[in-house]
Image (tube, rainbow, N blue to C red):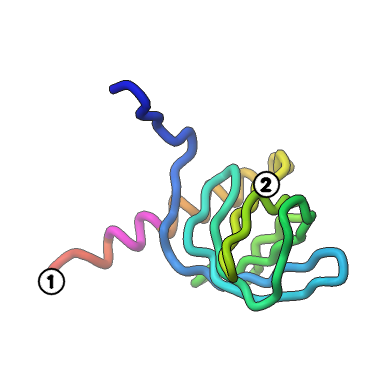
């Protein structure tokens, strides 16, 4: 399969509310795709490539927001943009992995017919 590459991290394609803060920027949006290494989202405050952001993700069913203190904007297309998590701390990486696993299992469970 030439030209085909597998993603190295499990991904969650589910809408998760997020707040993001950067140099003079404060916005809110929705994460549409989350992995251990980064995410894709839409937001209400414009960002630019290379901007360093702090993220607060509000995961359904979790009372504490997931905090990522270093997310670097990699691309921007209108209100959509992608960020790369700049090597999250082990505790943050573990929490991201747990959140993805929990939400993936919940998402798959919701498709069962009763």
Place residue 57 in its image quadrant.
bottom right
Left/right of residue 114 with respect to residue 4 in the rendered view: left
Which image quadrant: the N terminus? top left
Q: Residues within 10 Å of mark 1 (few under 14, many from 20)?
A: few
Q: Depth check: 45 or 29 in front?
A: 45
Most extreme residue toward the left is 114
Secondary structure character of the magenta stretch overall: helix
- Which label belongs to residue 114? 1
> Which residues are the magenta region?
104-108
Asked whether 98 falls inside the magenta stretch, the response is: no
Q: Earlier in the sequence, mark 1 or mark 2?
A: 2
Place residue 88 in its image quadrant.
top right
Closer to the eye: label 1 or 2: 2
What secondary structure is marked by label 2?
A: strand
- Which label belongs to residue 85? 2
Asked whether 105 falls inside the magenta stretch, the response is: yes
């Amino acid at each position: 399969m030439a030209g085909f590459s597998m993603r190295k991290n499990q991904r969650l394609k589910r809408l998760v509310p997020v707040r993001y803060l950067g140099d003079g920027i404060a916005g809110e949006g929705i994460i549409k795709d989350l992995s251990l290494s980064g995410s894709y989202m839409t937001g209400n405050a414009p960002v630019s490539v290379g901007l360093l952001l702090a993220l607060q993700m509000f995961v359904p069913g979790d009372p504490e927001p997931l905090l990522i203190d270093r997310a670097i904007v990699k691309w921007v297309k209108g209100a959509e943009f992608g960020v790369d998590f700049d090597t999250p701390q082990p505790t943050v990486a573990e929490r991201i992995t747990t959140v993805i696993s929990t939400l993936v299992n919940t998402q798959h469970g919701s498709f069962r017919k009763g």
